[in-house]
Image (spheres, grey):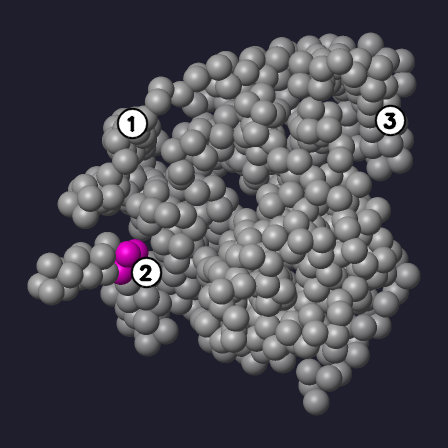
Amino acid sequence: METLGHILNGFSVCLQPMNLWYTFVGVLIGTIVGILPGIGPAASIALLIPMTFGMDPTSGLIMMAGIYYGTKYGGSATAILIRTPGEASSVMTSLDGYEMARNGRAGAALAVAAIGSFLAGTIGVLALTLFALPLSAVALKFGPAEYFCLMLFALTSVAALAGKSPAKGMLATVLGLMIATIGIDLQSGQQRFTAGIAELQDGVGFIVVVVGMFALAEVFRGLEQLYRGTAPEAMRIVGKLWLTRTEWQRSVGPIWRGGVIGFIVGVLPGAGGTIASLLSYATEKRLSKHPEEFGKGAIEGVAGPEAANNSDTAGAMVPLLTLGVPGGGATAVIMGAFIMHGIQPGPLLFQNRPDLVWGLIDSMYIGNIMLLILNLPLIGLFVRLLYIPSGILYPLIIAISVIGTYAINGSMFELYLILFFGVAGYLFDKVQIPVAPLVLSLVLAGIMEQSFRQALTISDGNLSTFVNSGISATLVTMSILSIAVPFVLPKFKWRKKSAV
Amino acid sequence: MKADRAIVVCSVLLAAVYFYAIEQIPSREIGDPLGAKAIPRILGVFLLLSAGLLMLEMRLARKNGQVTEDGGAPEDGRHYLVVGTVVILTLLYFAVFERLGYAVATSIYLNGLMAFFNRGRWKANILTSTLFSFGSYILFTKLFGAQLAPGILPF
């Protein structure tokens, strides 16, 4: 009953004309960003944060969330039409979606992606609505030690799952934490690693890192591809933007299953949309009566992963809103946006700002309806963006990055920093160091260090405080396991193979 | 594998520099049992630990026969030269950014990049770069109230 009251209150907030407008702007930008190569949700949210400074925080955050889930819709168009997923999480869609397009069913592939995204997105938001309040009540029992352990678990799982190598994931996490130590230490007031540079006293802003490592690095990669002549060509939409009766019947099951899988995976830190869509694809292939059609244009291979990919965004909002712990790169940037608006996400948010949190959750229902409208009748219009020459698009992204960074503080130093992080991100990609753990740890570092020091101050410097309670002990064990398992498991398998 | 070895060496070097920098932080631990150095020290140790884990991964990969020794045909390094040139152009753009102003500097910079990456369409390039630079300047400074360097422009 309490939840119902909150939901209704949330709708009264998100249905205000101004918030409806910002939901629309958010999902529109999200769709465009998802379609365009070179700028993902994390970078676009980071670039738009300065524009929200003058806004009411609720409107600003509604817009940010709209961009986040809107990109998932747009990402499917590039996966289907050019076999290049706009987002990593659309990679499974590109397998069968592109084949459907080659078979003259691009319209059906785009339609099932949009309908699947809408239905699963709504399932996800419904689950978020149901679980948010009970989980935030549990989180209220967390002390500094439990919080530190929770963040440690989030970081270790993201590190272990973000790339092919857990060691490189861990390295990226540590680098992010190290960058966060630059600046004035808030507890002692001492300067750390500023090298006498006044601009570094406030630390390295996360927007600078995100814009550099996500947007500029992607531009450098894109320009390299363009020079090498490996930039993909877009296919034209052929066929009606609707499904036949058989296609619809084949898609319903995968959409529902994908929705559930996506939400569960989204809640877990580190897993994200890529794993959700991969799991959904594997499930559908296993359950299908025609597994041989997968990879050759099976509609289930588009419906399931697209549903999982979208439901995952609602799942990812659960730990962010209820615990204040983001599970990946884009949600880490949204958390940064919360903090820049002076709002700390977490269990207290549900008590202190129910209007904001429920307005935000309910705006996702509205946003999903808007996205369905944008992505069904208007998708033909949006995919025209794919025909913009990359040689024009990439330079413009650099200029947008400059505006987004310079507009915050008017600092030239920050412009040089985005270039530094852009080059670093490009090199990281070359040597396969994942960037998401670095951004996540950068956002969490401040609260993590504060919790760590508070916990030790309360316990008189006794380290056992991190394993004294059941919650923290479990989280520490899970953190150790998430790093150790990828090393131990292959060794075990190898021994087993040798024994055979 | 060669890249992984380079990562290990760079991580160890970075850890050495980081530990040196930690020692430069003055000790003032009144009211805070840990002080400003504790977390950085832990991070330094974890950086070395990551390098160690990467070495372990390399060893396991070698043992299981999953090694790719960066062999094959030598890569044409010209694309690095292209990216390097873009970085240098961007540095030059930043160097004149405040002097010329956002709109003028961006217009010149975009024209330069588009002339190379979108060759042969000079009319479209000039039109796009000029309209985008001046349009975004007016939009952001006049409509959103954002600060962008005016430079030589009177407005």
Q: Which residues are magenta?
A: A482-486
- What amino acid does circle 1 point to? Gly
Please give the residue where the numbered disc 2 appears in the rendered image.
A482
Would you name the residue on which mark 3 appears?
Answer: B135
Residue A427 shown left or right of residue A11 in the figure: left
Amino acid type for the residue under numbered disc 3: Gly
In the rendered image, residue A205 lying in the magenta stretch gets the answer no
State the residue in front, A13 or A235: A235
Horizontally, is A142 left or right of A21 in the view? left
Magenta stretch, overall SS = helix
Query: Which circle, 1 or 2, is nearer the viewer?
Result: 1
Sequence-first tag of 3 and 1? 1
Q: How dense is the environment of label 2, judged by Cα within 10 Å: few (below 14), some, or many (20 and up)?
A: many
Question: Do the dots labelled 1 and 2 sit on one chain?
Answer: no
Within 10 Å of disc 1 (Cα), the crowding (few <14, some 14-19, many 20+) is few
Q: Residue at x 15, y 45 (%)?
A: B63
User: How far, Cα to Cα, is label 3 from label 2?
Assistant: 49 Å
What's under tag 2, amino acid-wise?
Answer: Ser
Task: Give percent across and percent down for residue B86.
Answer: 59, 17
Q: Nearer the viewer, residue A142 or A430?
A: A430
Q: Compared to A17, does A54 lie above or below?
A: above
Give the label on residue B71, or none: 1
